[in-house]
Image (cartoon, rainbow, N blue to C red):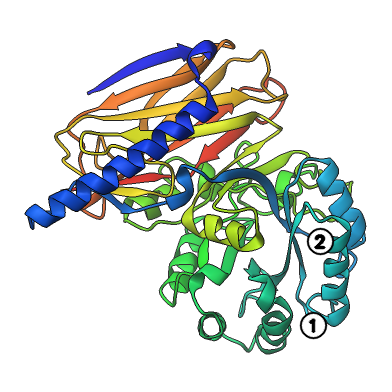
């Protein structure tokens, strides 16, 4: 059973009021849990996986996949960073190809990135690589991002040892983890997962194989770059993009939903430019944007937020804001994407989606879709509604939730759509919120 409520823009509320409310509630929740635990051994309804900065974090806009003249891109690092900043990027990852024949992860590469950091001090510039995952002969690519103190130390060795088809991906993941103090110091993202596949489920089996070693791989590049290309994303084989997104993320009930249904917390609400040149690509943050809620405005803050799933993404400058929260009895603080809580499935839960349109959606109606497995026990479209141009908030209330394929939990994720008559729709996706049904 569900209930729906639509709200016009004047009810969106002050951002400062919303943050202050969550901060006060977080303090109250800490006190309540402390008292309860001292009096009882019964499990408490509450958050089990937290995004601690959900109250006081900062929103930034990022592109995590770009190329320069250090591999097959057309621009210098300094020119690419300048363009990214002009387009509104707060964070930019330089991920030149790590083929042995290319110049990524060389002293000159890091020197150019450090020079760009000095020239653009307000930009967060990550020095990464795009790795050809063995043994696929260049078929599968992954962005490798590490903490700034480790870039020049780890990435050249990683390139030397694991950029060849005789290497093993499992060995590479173990090698990398052994050189980190914690997994928080690295993020690996499976890029354009379906581009060279004939079966979308190949991406699922490969991701699960890598995550069986460790969890350095956080998920998928949900919306690939090369958005100017024909075909979009340079998906030249059997599998094509769906409204500009990889089918891994876009197909409801597909790979991403199946993984979430089985209890795997993997993220795919990520959109990049994969910038190489102006013929194939929009500039960084000009069209594809990943909006990241970071604990602090540092590179380590970006890595931590990416690992936590604390981000959403849009294409075509669709939205300025997309706030997805879930409230339930016993939770004094609403959950946000990336978080998990234990609740009583018989109690009602309320999903709230609050958005603000950007230039790509001004004056337009938007379709909001809620996807998850909590109603039928399998991934499905739980609800959808159209927001008129003057509406930007919707609430859905659910009762008697059921668990999905893992027999333990339910999840919810959001898709926002602007219909485009003469081309692919413009889409924004959130990452999931998960509930453990006790």
Q: CA distance from mark 2 to mark 1?
A: 16 Å
The residue sitting at 48% across, 27% down in the picture is 17
**Image-based side of 180 in relation to 258, left or right:** right
Q: Nearer the viewer, mark 2 or mark 1?
A: 2
**Image-based side of 269 in relation to 48, left or right:** right
Task: Mark 2 and mark 1 in contact? Answer it, CB < 8 Å.
Answer: no
Q: Secondary structure at mark 1?
A: loop
Would you name the residue on which mark 2 appears? 67
Residue 418 seen by the camera: no
51 vs 180: above or below: above
- Depth check: 353 or 296 in front? 296
The residue sitting at 16% across, 41% down in the picture is 344
The N terminus - image quarter: top left
**Image-based side of 143 in relation to 31, left or right:** right
Image-quadrant location for residue 176: bottom right
Q: Position of residue 161 (x, y in %)?
A: 67, 89
Residue 115 seen by the camera: yes
- What's the mark number on residue 100? 1
Q: Which comes sooner in the sequence, label 2 or label 1?
A: 2
222 vs 418: above or below: below
Q: Secondary structure at mark 2?
A: loop
The residue sitting at 65% across, 58% down in the picture is 298
- What's the mark number on residue 222? none
Q: Position of residue 321 (x, y in %)?
A: 58, 31
């Amino acid at each position: 059973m569900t209930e729906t409520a639509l709200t016009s823009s004047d009810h969106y509320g002050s951002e400062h009021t919303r943050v202050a409310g969550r901060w006060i509630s977080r303090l109250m929740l800490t006190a309540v849990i402390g008292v309860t635990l001292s009096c009882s051994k019964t499990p408490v309804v509450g958050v089990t996986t937290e995004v601690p900065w959900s109250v006081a974090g900062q929103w930034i806009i990022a592109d995590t996949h770009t190329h320069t003249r250090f591999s097959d891109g057309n621009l210098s690092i300094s020119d690419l960073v300048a363009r990214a900043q002009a387009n509104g990027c707060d964070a930019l990852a330089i991920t030149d190809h790590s083929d042995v024949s290319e110049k990524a992860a060389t002293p000159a590469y890091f020197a150019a990135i450090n020079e760009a950091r000095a020239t653009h001090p307000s930009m967060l510039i990550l020095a990464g690589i795009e790795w050809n995952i063995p043994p696929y002969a260049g078929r599968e690519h992954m962005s490798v991002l590490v903490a700034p103190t480790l870039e020049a130390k780890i990435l050249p060795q990683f390139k030397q040892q694991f950029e060849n088809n005789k290497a093993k991906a499992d060995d590479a993941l173990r090698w990398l983890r052994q050189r980190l103090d914690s997994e928080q110091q690295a993020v690996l993202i499976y890029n354009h997962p379906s581009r060279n596949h004939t079966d979308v489920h190949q991406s699922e089996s490969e991701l699960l194989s890598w995550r069986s070693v460790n969890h350095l791989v956080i998920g998928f590049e949900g919306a690939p770059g090369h958005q100017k290309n024909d075909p979009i994303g340079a998906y030249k084989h059997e599998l094509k993009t769906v409204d500009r997104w990889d089918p891994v993320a876009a197909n409801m009930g597909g790979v991403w939903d199946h993984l979430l249904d089985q209890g795997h917390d993997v993220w795919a609400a990520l959109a990049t430019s994969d910038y190489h040149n102006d013929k194939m690509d929009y500039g960084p943050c000009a069209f594809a944007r990943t909006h990241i809620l970071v604990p602090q405005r540092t590179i380590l803050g970006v890595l931590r937020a990416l690992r936590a799933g604390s981000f959403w993404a849009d294409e075509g400058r669709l939205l300025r804001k997309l706030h997805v929260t879930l409230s339930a009895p016993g939770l004094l603080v609403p959950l946000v994407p990336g978080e998990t809580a234990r609740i009583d499935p018989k109690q009602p839960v309320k999903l709230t989606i609050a958005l603000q349109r950007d230039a790509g959606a001004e004056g337009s109606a938007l379709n909001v879709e809620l996807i998850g497995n909590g109603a039928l026990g399998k991934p499905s479209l739980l609800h959808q509604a159209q927001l008129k141009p003057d509406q930007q908030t919707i609430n859905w209330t659910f009762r008697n939730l059921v668990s999905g394929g893992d027999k333990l939990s339910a999840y919810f994720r959001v898709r926002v759509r602007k219909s485009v008559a003469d081309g692919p729709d413009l889409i924004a996706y959130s990452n999931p919120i998960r509930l453990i049904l006790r």
